[in-house]
Image (tube, rainbow, N blue to C red):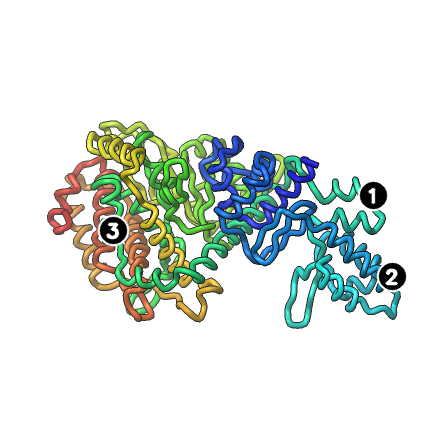
Amino acid sequence: MRNNKVVDRKLLLKRVFSRSKLFQIGKVLGVPYFINFHSEWDMDYDRAAFEIASNISDVQLEKVFSNYEPRGWEVFRGQYYTFENGKFRLEGYWKTIQAAIAQTKKKFGKNCIAVLKCLVNSGKGCSLKEVRQNLPESTDPSPILSDLEKLKVIVTSYRSKDFQEWTVLEETSPIIQLELGLAPREARKAAFVADIPAKADPIDEERQIVGEMDGELDDYLNDLFKYRVDETVKFGKSFSISRLAGYLKDLFGPILYFDSLLSITQQYGLADVEIVHSEGRTGMRTGWNLSLFGEPGTGKSFSVRDMILGKLDAKIPPHGIPGRNRYAGGMTPARFIRIGQAYSGRVFNFIIPEFNDWFKYKGMVEPLKLAMERGEIKYETHREVIGPYRFHSFFSVNYNVAAFGRGYELTIHDPNFNAIEDRMLCRLHRLTKQRFVEIAESQMRLVFGEIDIEEGAQQIRDHLSLVYAAETKHPLAQGKFSPKPVMLTPKAQEMLMRARKAILEEIPRKVVRFSARLEDRAIRFACAASLLSYFQSDLDFIPVSEAALKYAIQLYVEEASVRSQEEFVPESVLGKLALG
């Protein structure tokens, strides 16, 4: 009985809770399987449900349903548990199904058995036409299907104006097969798999993960539009890149805040909004890749991973878009190139904690370059050919280099780093005394509960998700909010030209050690940062804000200094531009 209950629990948990909810549940309950996982995307979804199901009692299961909101529209009719109309019961449904089948068999005889066999053997949805093929020519299955659905033996799996499909729920298949006279042991074995699943095709596995991420976003937006949309719009009326910077400075100090500012701004850019000017299109969009490089222990992972995905153990809630960040910790570059096909035509963000490790694999540099350029990837081994396919997603990565006091000197001797520096917005991390103090103080404040970022994180995540939904034409946003392009202004061109001139005047050599792509990244950052002002006007476009431009120029100047091996002091240039 215990094994059957575990299987029932596992199927129930997978049915009504998203991947991210299961991750939270497993962490909070202290289930051993979850100890070493930082993100829900590290875990196997099926295994996670099984591990929770194996480690909790019915009393704990009831508390899970009290503490975590399930998908209210789902239905579960198991041997020991029932979930229907948003309510969970510690009661099985099989006796009800047995009675319903007996009643329908008495009314329709062997035609009822034929209909149920068709649905059970299919393992998926069956249309009226498919069911009819299993009955005598003159028999209409419609009344049988109607009665079986009313009695809750079967459910509608798909319905449109002129088409409908029915199916048998996975958890009810064993009892239905038993009632049809099929071998019960084999029936249960086929329907309930309590063990870890066999290895599937990596691309199929990844497509399932993509589907789960889509579901996570839909669940979050459903909840947002149902309960918090008005207050989110009100919040957005005064929200801006300056307010985000102020929020982060209050939390982490005047140095650490900037990296989290970059990673959250990159999240707004994932909507990949078109950038225009007064004369028309620019051919640019707001998406960009982010790389924080430098010494380990300088807060890189905190900024690109913890702030975006959240870290339950440290009481850091997520700030990133739900279901649009694929954590790739522990993934090999070869696997990434293979599963990248599942993301063709879609825009996600890959969070990679140690990107430098990916370049140590033979033959990986070229396909990774193409991935960073959102290009067409094709990779051949002696066993298989991967692609060609076009990769449309972005990266947030850490690139560990022991810089110490020498700044950029070590990175320029790393040929692999050269592969990414012109394809990403890069930011140097050096463990200065001031950075060390801010990291240490932030850690202590988090440990002793002096930093409470839940409310701010929720407001920012809601705003980010709502802007994303509007700009990507999500079905829930259509008719309520419209996509708006970001418009470059003459002021933006003027500020970039002034910054370029001031930088070149400070460089003593004739040779420039950085490319013009730095300006491209600065523009994209400024436009992504301007999306924070989406709700501030009724215009059908979003003008680049002056505050966003100031942060973009700061990035441009500081990165130009680093790539020039610090031949000039960025504060000098920023002072001339009145941005110090």
Report the residue marked by disc 3: 552
Q: Residues within 10 Å of mark 3 (few under 14, many from 20)?
A: many
Name the image quarter holding residue 155.
Answer: bottom right
Name the image quarter holding residue 158.
Answer: bottom right
Report the residue marked by disc 2: 109
| Left or right, residue 239 beside residue 6 | left
Would residue 412 be visible to someone looking at this image? no
Which is more N-terminal, label 1 or label 3? 1
Q: Is residue 347 above or below residue 543?
A: above
Which is closer to the viewer, label 2 or label 1?
Answer: 2
Q: Amino acid at mark 2?
A: Gly
| Left or right, residue 447 beside residue 68 | left
Quadrant of the drawing holding the N terminus: top right
Residue 530 percent across, percent down from the top left? 29, 58
Q: Amino acid at mark 1?
A: Ala
Which is more N-terminal, label 2 or label 3? 2
Residue 203 percent across, percent down from the top left? 59, 44
Mark seen at residue 183? 1
